[in-house]
């Protein structure tokens, strides 16, 4: 198995990030969402390397096969971990693709490290620019929503993860866009994470303000969000991120839930490939209609 050292923790122990590295060509780094691991990118890892791309995906500290530290679950640390991945593998002309809380890593990295080594970025169902509802962020989500998430994780993490996964993919009485087997797989991926990381990351992605970070992005940017996302509502995230990066290409997936990396996997793969290989003109796209 392959690991990258990302500094040490507060106790002086090495922090190791597990990663996979497939294909050759223009490098694409996939940053996973909460509460999963790099394995959520299964269908992207199986397709993107076929298209002249070197595709790297890694586990965030505390998740998957990476070191389960006690602390360090904040975006300055996450951005430093991303830098360690890019530096250790000596990647250049990189496309960063961040899903959900992974979009925060992109924003903070671009601001803190001046976008070093990065040619373009893609935010997919991202938590940017600022999820928490405050006086100066009225379109955010009430803090009580995140407090309840933490309370339920602490009460019964297994039950929370299984319930959360259904909302994640838009599963209800009449809609079953994913199989029970897939939900079971996600539960297995999420449950191996540390309890501490799972809780601390809720606070990190809900309370971190990325509004200034987004102003530091000066490379081609792709924003993709589902308009039926009940986990990271498009009104609080995708719409505002698109407004914050005026020259970004913004694509709304009509009817897609949060977990569109699976439910819309073929379309997402095509959009990422086009973005990396051909570039995409600026504009806003909903379904198949550009305006």
Image (tube, rainbow, N blue to C red):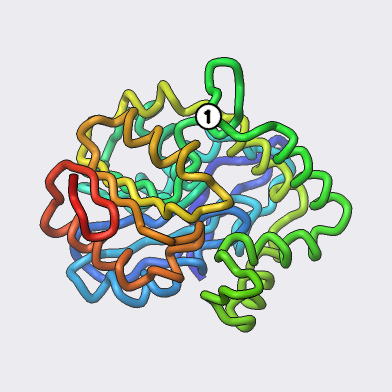
- Residue 95 vs 235, above or below: the answer is below
Q: Tell me where residue 250 sits by quadrant.
A: top left
Q: What is the tally of numbered marks visible in this picture?
A: 1
Residue position for label 1: 139
Residue 134 at x, y percent in the picture: 61, 21
* Image quarter (top left, top right, bottom left or bottom right) of the C terminus: top left
Residue farthest to the front, as pictured: 174
Residue 12 at x, y percent in the picture: 68, 39
- Residue 260 vs 115, above or below: the answer is below
- Residue 287 vs 250, above or below: the answer is below
Residue 90 appearing in the image: no
Residue 127 at x, y percent in the picture: 50, 41
Q: Residue at x 73, y 55 (%)?
A: 194
- Residue 291 as seen in the image, left or right of residue 159: left
Work out whether residue 106 or residue 23 is closer to the camera in this orientation and state it.
106
Work out whether residue 159 or residue 228 is closer to the camera in this orientation and state it.
228
**Label 1: how many residues lie within 10 Å, few (<14), some (14-19) or many (20+)?**
some
Q: Residue at x 60, y 58 (%)?
A: 66
Residue 57 at x, y percent in the picture: 42, 61
């Amino acid at each position: 198995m392959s690991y990258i050292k990302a500094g040490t923790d507060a106790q002086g122990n090495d922090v190791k990030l597990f990663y996979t590295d497939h294909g050759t060509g223009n490098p694409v780094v996939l940053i996973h969402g909460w509460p999963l691991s790099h394995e959520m990118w299964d269908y992207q890892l199986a397709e993107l390397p076929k298209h002249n791309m070197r595709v790297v995906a890694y586990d965030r500290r505390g998740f998957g096969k990476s070191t389960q530290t006690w602390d360090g679950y904040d975006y300055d640390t996450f951005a430093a971990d991303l830098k360690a991945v890019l530096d250790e593998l000596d990647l250049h002309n990189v496309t960063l693709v961040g899903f959900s809380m992974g979009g925060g890593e992109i924003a903070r990295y671009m601001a803190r490290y001046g976008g070093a080594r990065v040619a373009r970025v893609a935010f997919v169902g991202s938590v940017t620019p600022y999820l928490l509802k405050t006086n100066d962020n009225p379109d955010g989500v009430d803090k009580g929503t995140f407090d309840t998430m933490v309370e339920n994780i602490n009460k019964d993490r297994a039950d929370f993860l299984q319930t959360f996964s259904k909302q994640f993919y838009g599963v209800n009485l009449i809609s079953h866009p994913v199989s029970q087997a897939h939900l079971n797989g996600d539960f297995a991926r999420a449950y191996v994470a540390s309890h501490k990381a799972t809780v601390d990351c809720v606070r990190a992605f809900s309370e971190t303000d990325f509004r200034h970070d987004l102003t530091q992005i000066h490379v081609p940017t792709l924003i993709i969000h589902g308009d039926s996302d009940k986990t990271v509502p498009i009104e609080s995230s995708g719409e505002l991120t698109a407004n914050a990066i005026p020259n970004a290409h913004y694509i709304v997936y009509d009817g897609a839930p949060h977990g569109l990396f699976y439910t819309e996997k073929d379309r997402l793969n095509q959009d990422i490939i086009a973005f990396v290989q051909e570039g995409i003109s600026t504009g806003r796209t909903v379904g198949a209609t550009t305006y």
